[in-house]
Image: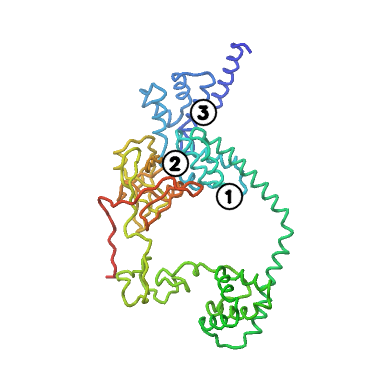
């Protein structure tokens, strides 16, 4: 095609697109960023210079936007007009709404990868037109299905830094989705065999219960020590049996009865007594896994035979600290049970570490109780930053006080040379300079090792990427709370 014909066709497309472009009047329902993007896209058809883009933009202004431009006729350069237009007609409320949508956007169960990808990328560009590829990938990974998240992160880590783009993320996500769908199809083909296996296993506990009910004729339950001595004298295999039983709650016991019922008949009765003594309310006819109270000790007395909220030593008002000390008391007081000596992993002070924030060395708090990362506006003024996003909202702290948020900023958090990135809220009344919240902790697989006073950043293979020790802050600010009611 000759150049003249090609240019003529491009001019036709240009005129048609420009005439179909809706005028921008500055209302809340219109998005000025989309309007500017449309102007630049149409201008590229004819390789329009900045002067033409300026004329195109001003010709499409109407209503309040047109009146605003008439008061600012000194804006004669396209870049100046674009930035001023964005600043004038972008409200902090709309930015905060988009940010909240971005944080809450999760892939639905029946949603395709492509649909989820397009929605998140659109929100990212609406929130920040200059958002980096790394931040977009972070948002995409944050809301994708849990079944895909680990596999996608692992594949992305294998790519070189320059190849980690949103398009690469989309391709990897589609491939992983197809693999999982193939695996689920193969698993469905084996489904008819599962009912037979389930019925065979479920009949065994009922048979054992009926045998146990026939042998249990006495209401007297002997102590564990007496039972142990009795079984040790009457059975040469009791040691092996008990060690096997201690490995599980009941599954090995049932499988042993099925394989050799006559040999283990005495042990079946004894084991039934022992289980009844330990757990009076538990029915041995159904081999269910142990409750959490059997694995996690009581937070008050550290015993494992009950939950914290039903502990005998529970205080009628106030609360207990996880370190074993009552509010206003000491762990050695008479109210506490005797012979309890343990150390809590809960620190009495916040976790402080040294980091580089946008290449400036500074100490920071790692707070697992905060959902988001927050930086004090005073610290932000002292460090290099760009692309500050104006928005206004309030966070509620644990003591119901309000934290005033005036905007957001992308930060580079460097630990021992390892770079991480996070989109942080900017606060005016934060008591500390920088607080790294759960959004940063989860995104970087952070492990807080309180006994060894270190934090570790792990990769997807659970290998340590970098670690750094806790530090003592130069100035420590803690809230003062009453230990007794006044």
> Depth-wise, is mark 1 or mark 2 nearer the camera?
1
Q: Which mark is residue 94?
A: 2
State which tag comes first along the sequence, 2 or 3. Answer: 3
Question: 339 or 301, which lies in front?
Answer: 339
What secondary structure is marked by label 2?
helix
Tag 3–tag 1 contact (CB < 8 Å): no
Residue lying farthest to the left in this orientation: 475
Residue 373 in the image: above or below residue 450: above
Report the residue marked by disc 3. Answer: 38
Report the residue marked by disc 1. Answer: 147
Residue 405 rendering spot, x and y as whole percentages: 36, 46
> Is residue 313 rendered to the left or right of residue 267?
left
Work out which quarter of the rendered image holds the C terminus and state it.
bottom left
Residue shown at the point (57%, 81%) measured from the top left: 231
What secondary structure is marked by label 1?
helix
Q: Callout 3 environment at 10 Å: few (<14), some (14 to 19), or many (20+)?
A: some
Residue 437 rendering spot, x and y as whole percentages: 40, 50
Q: How many marks?
A: 3
CA distance for labels 1 and 2: 32 Å
Residue 196 rendering spot, x and y as whole percentages: 73, 64
Q: Callout 2 environment at 10 Å: few (<14), some (14 to 19), or many (20+)?
A: some
What secondary structure is marked by label 3?
helix
Residue 41 in the image: above or below residue 411: above
Report which quarter residue 78 is drawn in: top left
> Is residue 355 rendered to the left or right of residue 184?
left
């Amino acid at each position: 095609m000759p150049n003249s014909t090609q240019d003529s066709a491009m001019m036709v497309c240009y005129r048609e697109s420009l005439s179909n472009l809706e005028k921008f009047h500055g209302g809340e329902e219109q998005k000025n960023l989309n309007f500017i993007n449309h102007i630049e896209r149409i201008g590229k058809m004819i390789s329009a210079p900045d002067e033409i883009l300026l004329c195109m933009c001003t010709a499409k202004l109407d209503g309040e936007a047109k009146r605003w431009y008439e008061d600012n006729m000194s804006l004669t350069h396209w870049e100046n007009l674009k930035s001023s237009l964005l600043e004038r007609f972008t409200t902090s409320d709309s930015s905060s709404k988009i940010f909240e949508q971005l944080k809450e956007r999760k892939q639905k169960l029946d949603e395709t990868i492509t649909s989820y990808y397009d929605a998140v990328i659109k929100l990212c560009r609406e929130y920040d037109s200059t958002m980096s590829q790394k931040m977009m990938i972070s948002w995409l990974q944050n809301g994708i299905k849990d079944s895909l998240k680990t596999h996608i992160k692992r594949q992305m880590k294998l790519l070189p830094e320059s190849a980690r783009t949103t398009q690469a993320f989309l391709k990897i996500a589609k491939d992983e989705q197809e693999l999982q769908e193939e695996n689920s199809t193969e698993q469905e083909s084996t489904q008819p065999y599962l009912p037979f296996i389930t019925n065979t296993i479920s009949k065994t506990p009922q048979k054992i219960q009926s045998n146990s009910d026939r042998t249990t004729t006495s209401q007297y339950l002997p102590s564990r020590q007496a039972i142990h001595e009795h079984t040790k004298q009457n059975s040469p295999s009791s040691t092996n049996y008990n060690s096997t039983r201690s490995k599980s709650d009941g599954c090995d016991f049932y499988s042993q009865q099925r394989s050799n019922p006559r040999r283990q008949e005495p042990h079946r009765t004894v084991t039934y007594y022992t289980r009844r003594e330990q757990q009076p309310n538990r029915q041995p006819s159904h081999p269910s896994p142990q409750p959490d109270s059997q694995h996690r000790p009581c937070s008050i007395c550290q015993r494992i035979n009950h939950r914290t909220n039903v502990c005998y030593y529970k205080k009628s008002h106030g609360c207990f600290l996880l370190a074993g000390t009552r509010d206003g008391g000491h762990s050695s007081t008479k109210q506490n049970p005797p012979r309890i000596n343990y150390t809590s992993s809960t620190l009495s002070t916040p976790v402080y570490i040294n980091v580089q924030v946008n290449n400036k060395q500074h100490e920071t708090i790692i707070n697992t109780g905060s959902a988001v990362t927050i930086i004090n506006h005073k610290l932000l003024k002292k460090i290099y930053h760009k692309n500050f996003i104006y928005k206004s909202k309030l966070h509620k702290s644990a003591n119901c006080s309000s934290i005033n948020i005036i905007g957001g900023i992308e930060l580079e958090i460097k630990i021992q040379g390892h770079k991480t990135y996070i989109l942080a809220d900017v606060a005016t009344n934060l008591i500390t300079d920088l607080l790294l919240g759960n959004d940063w902790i989860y995104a970087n697989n952070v492990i807080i090792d309180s006994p060894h006073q270190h934090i570790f950043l792990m990769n997807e293979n659970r290998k340590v990427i970098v670690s750094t020790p806790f530090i003592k802050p130069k100035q420590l600010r803690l809230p003062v709370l009453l230990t007794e009611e006044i």
